[in-house]
Image: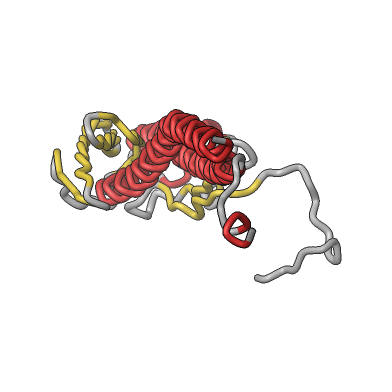
């Protein structure tokens, strides 16, 4: 009687197999989901980098155009600072010393903002880069005490 | 006689279980292989982005970057092809920089940017 109690009866191996297969399937699905999450994150990171550099390219082309015009205006002014200032005001609708701004979307919720200052004729540089930064442009306004902490 | 029938039934059950286990294992193996494949692609893309950004920023900063360089990460070889084409303007140079990163024959990341370098005026 006690001999029979210790033996594995029919169905035990089936139950064991079902448990093992369920566990293995669960592990497999979890690893696949995790890998898919990683892949989607990598794809988003690549997309964000491409968007950022596209915006920087936009700025590069914009500043090339602005600087070429400034160069031409300097040549036309022929050393006359007043004439140069007047020509700059006519061409760009800003006065010498004022800042011009460039802005371009750099993917969803981000924008590249750059500012340059037009320098007077006495300077050897035609413009000075004031800022070149990436900003978040989400429409949501964050208010204090809404479950988040301001770190810096 | 009854004991023999019982033993035979258990044996048949074990054989069926082993067969089913083998079939299911083959399917599960494919699942794990797919997950591993995706993980490797994700790792290659992430490393490719870092390598491309590194090469691009070095080019923008005016550093000399080899047209083709190889790097090894996690036992895999990454080929980084960099190209910088200067376009001359009266007031400066527009530098077109492009970087392509390949791993195991496939392109994993490609970035490009155009950066302007002004020249100083004499005035």
> Residue B93 occupies which quadrant of the picture?
top left
Which is more toward the observer, A138 or A73?
A: A138
Can residue A147 be seen from the camera position used here?
yes
Q: Looking at the image, which is closer to me, B29 or A120?
A: B29
Image quadrant where one finds the N terminus of chain B: top right
Q: Residue at x 52, y 31 (%)?
A: A91
Q: Is residue B110 above or below residue A34?
A: above
Q: Is residue A129 left or right of residue A104?
A: left
Q: Is residue A90 above or below residue A146?
A: above
Position of residue A36 measured from the top left corner of the image (x, y, whole percent): 51, 38
Is B38 situated left or right of A112 in this image?
left
How far across and how far down the image is residue B58, in percent?
26, 51
Instruction: From the viewer's side, name the closer residue of A5 and B21.
Output: A5
Res A29 → quadrant: top right
Can you give x and y, in whole percent of width and height, for residue B2 in the image? Answer: 58, 36
Is residue A41 visible to us here?
no
Residue A30's image quarter? top right
* Residue found 72% across the figure and 68% down from its top: A150
From the viewer's perspective, tell me whether residue A70 is left or right of residue A108. left
Residue A135 in the image, given as x and y percentages of width and height: 60, 49
Residue in the picture at 20% in, 52% down: B63
């Amino acid at each position: 009687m006690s001999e029979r109690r210790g033996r594995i009866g029919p169905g035990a191996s089936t139950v064991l197999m079902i448990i093992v297969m369920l566990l293995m399937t669960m592990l497999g699905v979890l690893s696949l989901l995790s890998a898919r999450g990683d892949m989607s994150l990598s794809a988003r990171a690549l997309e964000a980098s491409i968007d950022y550099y596209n915006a920087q390219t936009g700025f590069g082309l914009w500043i090339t155009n602005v600087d070429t015009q400034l160069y031409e205006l300097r040549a036309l002014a022929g050393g006359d600072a007043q004439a140069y200032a007047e020509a700059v005001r006519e061409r760009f609708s800003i006065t010498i010393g004022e800042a011009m701004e460039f802005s371009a979307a750099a993917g969803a919720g981000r924008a590249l903002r750059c500012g340059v200052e037009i320098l007077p004729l006495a300077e050897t540089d035609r413009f000075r880069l004031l800022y070149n930064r990436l900003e978040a442009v989400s429409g949501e306004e964050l208010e204090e005490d809404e479950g988040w902490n301001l770190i810096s | 006689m009854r004991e023999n029938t019982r033993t035979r039934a258990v044996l048949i059950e074990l054989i069926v279980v082993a067969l089913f286990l083998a079939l299911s294992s083959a399917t599960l193996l494919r699942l794990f292989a797919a997950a591993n494949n995706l993980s490797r692609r994700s790792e290659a893309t992430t490393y490719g982005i870092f390598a491309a950004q590194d090469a691009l920023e070095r080019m923008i900063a005016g550093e000399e970057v080899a047209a083709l360089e190889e790097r090894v990460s996690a036992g895999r070889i990454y080929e980084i092809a960099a190209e910088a084409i200067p376009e001359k303007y009266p007031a400066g140079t527009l530098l077109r920089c492009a970087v392509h990163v390949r791993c195991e024959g496939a392109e994993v990341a490609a970035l490009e940017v155009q950066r302007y370098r002004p020249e100083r005026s004499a005035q």
